[in-house]
Image (tube, rainbow, N blue to C red):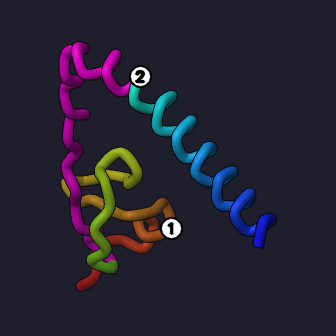
Amino acid sequence: MRYILLFLLGLLGIWWLRRLVNGESGRAQSGAAPRAPAPSERIAGCAHCGLHVPESEGVSEGGHFYCSEAHRRLGPRG
Protein backbone atom coordinates (compact mmCIF):
# COMPACT_ATOMS: atom_id res chain seq x y z
CA MET A 1 0.00 0.00 0.00
CA ARG A 2 2.85 2.36 0.81
CA TYR A 3 4.47 1.79 -2.60
CA ILE A 4 1.23 2.57 -4.41
CA LEU A 5 0.90 5.83 -2.46
CA LEU A 6 4.54 6.77 -3.24
CA PHE A 7 3.99 5.96 -6.91
CA LEU A 8 0.87 8.15 -7.06
CA LEU A 9 2.68 10.99 -5.27
CA GLY A 10 5.52 10.68 -7.80
CA LEU A 11 3.07 10.90 -10.70
CA LEU A 12 1.41 13.91 -9.10
CA GLY A 13 4.81 15.59 -8.70
CA ILE A 14 5.75 14.95 -12.33
CA TRP A 15 2.38 16.30 -13.50
CA TRP A 16 2.79 19.41 -11.33
CA LEU A 17 6.33 20.07 -12.62
CA ARG A 18 5.28 19.68 -16.26
CA ARG A 19 2.33 22.00 -15.72
CA LEU A 20 4.59 24.55 -14.06
CA VAL A 21 7.12 24.46 -16.90
CA ASN A 22 4.51 24.51 -19.69
CA GLY A 23 2.48 27.20 -17.95
CA GLU A 24 5.40 29.61 -17.80
CA SER A 25 6.34 29.09 -21.44
CA GLY A 26 2.69 29.47 -22.43
CA ARG A 27 2.44 32.81 -20.65
CA ALA A 28 5.54 34.08 -22.43
CA GLN A 29 4.13 33.14 -25.81
CA SER A 30 0.69 34.65 -25.20
CA GLY A 31 2.12 38.19 -25.49
CA ALA A 32 3.64 37.49 -28.90
CA ALA A 33 1.88 38.60 -32.07
CA PRO A 34 -0.13 35.86 -33.80
CA ARG A 35 1.56 34.31 -36.81
CA ALA A 36 0.07 34.82 -40.25
CA PRO A 37 -1.31 31.64 -41.83
CA ALA A 38 0.76 29.99 -44.53
CA PRO A 39 -0.26 30.95 -48.06
CA SER A 40 -2.62 28.45 -49.60
CA GLU A 41 -1.76 26.52 -52.73
CA ARG A 42 -4.03 25.66 -55.62
CA ILE A 43 -5.06 22.06 -56.14
CA ALA A 44 -5.52 20.84 -59.71
CA GLY A 45 -6.86 17.65 -61.24
CA CYS A 46 -4.74 15.45 -63.49
CA ALA A 47 -5.90 15.49 -67.12
CA HIS A 48 -5.14 11.76 -67.40
CA CYS A 49 -6.40 10.14 -64.17
CA GLY A 50 -8.32 12.93 -62.42
CA LEU A 51 -6.24 12.80 -59.22
CA HIS A 52 -6.12 16.16 -57.45
CA VAL A 53 -2.65 17.25 -56.28
CA PRO A 54 -1.03 20.58 -55.36
CA GLU A 55 0.21 22.43 -58.43
CA SER A 56 3.78 22.48 -57.08
CA GLU A 57 3.86 18.66 -57.12
CA GLY A 58 2.47 18.18 -60.63
CA VAL A 59 3.54 18.85 -64.21
CA SER A 60 1.92 21.22 -66.72
CA GLU A 61 2.16 21.02 -70.49
CA GLY A 62 0.05 22.39 -73.30
CA GLY A 63 -2.57 23.86 -71.01
CA HIS A 64 -3.10 20.53 -69.23
CA PHE A 65 -2.07 19.59 -65.69
CA TYR A 66 -0.77 16.12 -64.79
CA CYS A 67 -0.05 14.47 -61.45
CA SER A 68 3.22 12.92 -62.68
CA GLU A 69 5.69 12.87 -65.52
CA ALA A 70 4.40 9.45 -66.62
CA HIS A 71 0.86 10.79 -67.04
CA ARG A 72 2.20 13.82 -68.91
CA ARG A 73 3.82 11.44 -71.42
CA LEU A 74 0.53 9.51 -71.77
CA GLY A 75 -1.41 12.71 -72.41
CA PRO A 76 -5.00 13.60 -71.54
CA ARG A 77 -7.52 10.82 -71.35
CA GLY A 78 -9.76 10.84 -74.40
Q: Position of residue 62 (x, y in %)?
A: 24, 53
Which residue is situated farthest in the front direction here?
2
Q: Position of residue 1 (x, y in %)?
A: 76, 73
- Give the residue at mark 1: 70
Q: Position of residue 17 (x, y in %)?
A: 56, 35
Kind of residue sitting beneath label 1: Ala
Q: Quadrant of the C terminus?
A: bottom left
Kind of residue sitting beneath label 2: Glu
Q: What's the magenta region?
A: 24-48
Q: Give the Cα distance between marks 1 and 2.
A: 53 Å
Q: Is residue 51 left or right of residue 42?
A: right
Q: Quick one: SS at disc 1?
A: helix
Main SS class of the magenta portion in the image:
loop
Q: Are marks 1 and 2 in contact (CB under 8 Å)?
A: no
* Closer-to-camera residue (32/16): 16
Vertical position of residue 27 compared to residue 47: above or below: above
Vertical position of residue 72 compared to residue 24: above or below: below
Residue for point 29% across, 50% down: 55
